[in-house]
């Protein structure tokens, strides 16, 4: 897929105010500081499209970007950031749930996982919840350039093994690096294949 345009559309603090014009939506979510904004900028080849920060937990709204005038890329708040208050955590949890579980929810939810880490309970719990709710999703392992090859392979394999304990069929997964652009074509081709399948 060739991205010729990527435009910010709207930020929302409520899921029911998000665009509902029938365009496919591909939402990106993950633990705070997983490299979500960097990945979005890499995928769209727009350096400043999504705001990046060294401070975790900056994304507090649902941000919609229109790609090629045909589909939405959606930047969701991160989960699992310990320094937020209980009230903030609960509020963001409701915001994410309302968006993900709404009748016109995402065409596919990409769950970002830090490839430098062994399987984290917060990520596994979130994915199991998606499965229980029937939310279509794929897994994106990030920061592949920051892990040694052996470490990367072990962590990815360990995560998939942990999922197999409860899943007969694993969801699609991708290994990416915002720095080297690894996985970019694979991810965009996957989105393109879904878009083509949705056309009459």
Image (tube, rainbow, N blue to C red):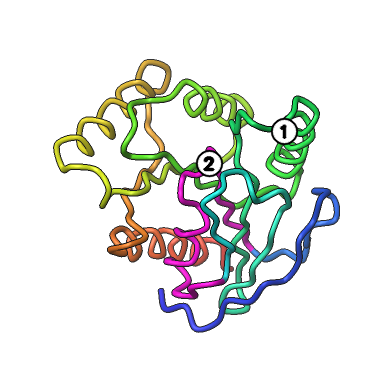
- Classify residue 170 as left or right of residue 22: left
Which quarter of the rendering shows the N terminus? bottom left
Between residues 178 and 18, which one lies in front from this camera angle? 178
Does the magenta segment cover residue 99?
A: no
Relative to residue 174, is residue 47 drawn left or right?
right
Q: Which residue is mark 1?
A: 93
- In the foreground, 186 or 152: 152
Relative image position of residue 195 (x, y in whole percent): 52, 64
Q: Is residue 23 left or right of residue 10?
A: left
Q: CA distance from mark 2 to mark 1?
A: 12 Å
Judge whether 159 appears above or below 50 on screen: above
Q: If the image is split into quadrants, where does the C terminus sit?
A: bottom right
Residue 171 x %, y %:
41, 37
Q: Is residue 131 above or below residue 114?
A: above
The residue to which callout 2 is attached is: 30
Few, some or many residues within 10 Å of mark 2 (<14, 14–19, 20+): many
Q: Where in the figure is residue 126, as x and y percent of width and height?
A: 56, 28
Q: Which residues are magenta?
A: 24-48
């Amino acid at each position: 897929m060739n991205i010729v345009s990527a435009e910010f559309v709207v930020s929302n603090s409520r899921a029911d105010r998000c665009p509902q014009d029938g365009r496919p939506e591909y939402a990106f979510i993950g633990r705070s500081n997983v490299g979500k904004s960097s990945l979005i900028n890499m995928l769209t080849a727009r350096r400043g499209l999504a705001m990046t920060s060294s401070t975790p937990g900056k994304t507090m709204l649902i941000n919609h970007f229109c790609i090629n005038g045909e589909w939405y890329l959606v930047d969701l708040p991160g989960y699992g950031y310990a320094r937020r208050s209980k009230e903030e955590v609960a509020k963001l949890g409701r915001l994410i749930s309302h968006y993900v579980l709404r009748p016109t929810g995402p065409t596919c939810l990409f769950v970002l996982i830090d490839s430098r880490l062994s399987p984290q309970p917060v990520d596994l719990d979130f994915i199991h919840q998606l499965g229980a709710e029937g939310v279509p999703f794929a897994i994106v392992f990030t920061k592949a350039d920051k892990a040694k090859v052996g470490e990367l392979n072990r962590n990815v394999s360990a995560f998939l093994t942990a999922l197999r304990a409860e899943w007969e069929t694993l969801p699609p997964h991708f290994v990416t690096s915002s720095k080297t652009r690894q996985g970019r074509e694979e991810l965009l081709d996957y989105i393109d294949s879904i878009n083509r399948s949705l056309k009459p």
